[in-house]
Image (cartoon, rainbow, N blue to C red):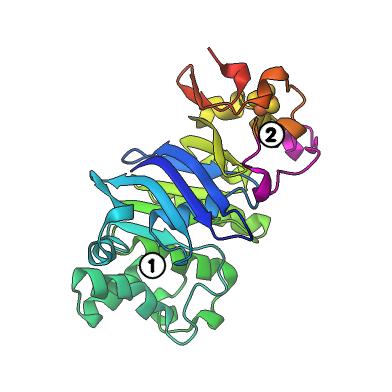
Amino acid sequence: MVIKNLTVEFPGHGNPIRAVDRVDLEIKKGERVVLVGETGSGKSVLLLSLLRLLPASARTTGEVLYKGKNLLRMSEDELCRIRGQELAYIPQGTGSALNPVLTVGIQVAEPLMVHLGFKKGPALEKAVSLLGQLGIPEARKRAFEYPHQYSGGMKQRALVAMGVVAEPEILLADEPTKGVDWEKREEILNLFQSLTGKTILTVTHDLWFAEKFAQKVAVMYAAQIVEVAPQVEFFRQPLHPYAQALLAALPSRGLQPLAGYAPEHSRYHEPGCRFRKRCSRAFHRCQEEPPLFEHNGRWVRCWLCAG
Ligand code: SF4
């Protein structure tokens, strides 16, 4: 999947609110890409925009190329065929994402019936088998239970099962570890790591998860991508001052909190680097907006990395 110049705007009082701003990102076949950033940076909106799951009021421009076709311009019928079968979405949270009046097994089986023409019996059989593989104990019995009978960790597994049951080519997962305790985070990481060979784009604020799971890390700040780098290099030496500050705030790296706040959406149109008010290395050139510079095979939106 290749994302080119993707911008998402919502109507606001006066100027539109730009939640995603000219994003370029490539997710190669079989690659695990993790997009990190603070709450409100635009990463979840970006993920939803790829599958056109945003409210009708959102205005999305740019290109999302999948097998050479732009998902943003595809007919609804064509997109419906692809969604759930070739591209699957695993939503954030475990509470409201499952239908409370349907058994978990039927919900996991549904993509097989809708997209691949399975009859109910074989679809349920496959759902049971997958739930078992993903660590649901007594899967044959539990498949006929309702979401409220599942623990938080089991609901997360059920959501992953729904996402992968039709063997999609690309999985898009929104904040898989949000709101879960330490023990469950390990479980979810193991679950995602077990999806070997899949092409996965995950958005998260959880740098621990990103370090353990990603092959490539992209960082989003104030609606823009500010750094893209291979996982090992990123965690060894982040280049963008915001990425450096994110890592420095980790307990394992000194717990130095980043002062200040990201700019309001209404200030995005102001000239200059959006991080400059919080950046200890800002200089005169930062009054101008930096583009994404290629720097030793990485991409960095900072004048310090200009050739
Ligand atoms: S462009 Fe300037 S303000 Fe922005 S991150 Fe780089 S040094 Fe800091």
Q: Residues within 10 Å of mark 1 (few under 14, many from 20)?
A: many
- The answer to whether residue 244 is magenta is no
Residue that carries the numbered disc 1 in the rendered image:
162
Instruction: Tell me where residue 11 sits by quadrant.
Output: bottom right
Q: Residues within 10 Å of mark 2 (few under 14, many from 20)?
A: many
The residue type indicated by label 1 comes to Met
Where are the magenta residues, as a range? Answer: 245-270
Q: Is residue 15 left or right of residue 168?
A: right
Q: Is residue 256 left or right of residue 51?
A: right
- The answer to whether residue 257 is magenta is yes
Q: Position of residue 30 (x, y in %)?
A: 33, 41
The residue type indicated by label 2 comes to Phe
Please tell me in which quarter of the rendered image ligand 1 is found.
Answer: top right
Mark closest to the chain's N terminus, 1 or 2? 1
Q: Position of residue 54 (x, y in %)?
A: 46, 63
Residue that carries the numbered disc 2 in the rendered image:
275
- Nearest the viewer among 160 and 114 is 114
- Nearest the viewer among 287 and 51 is 287
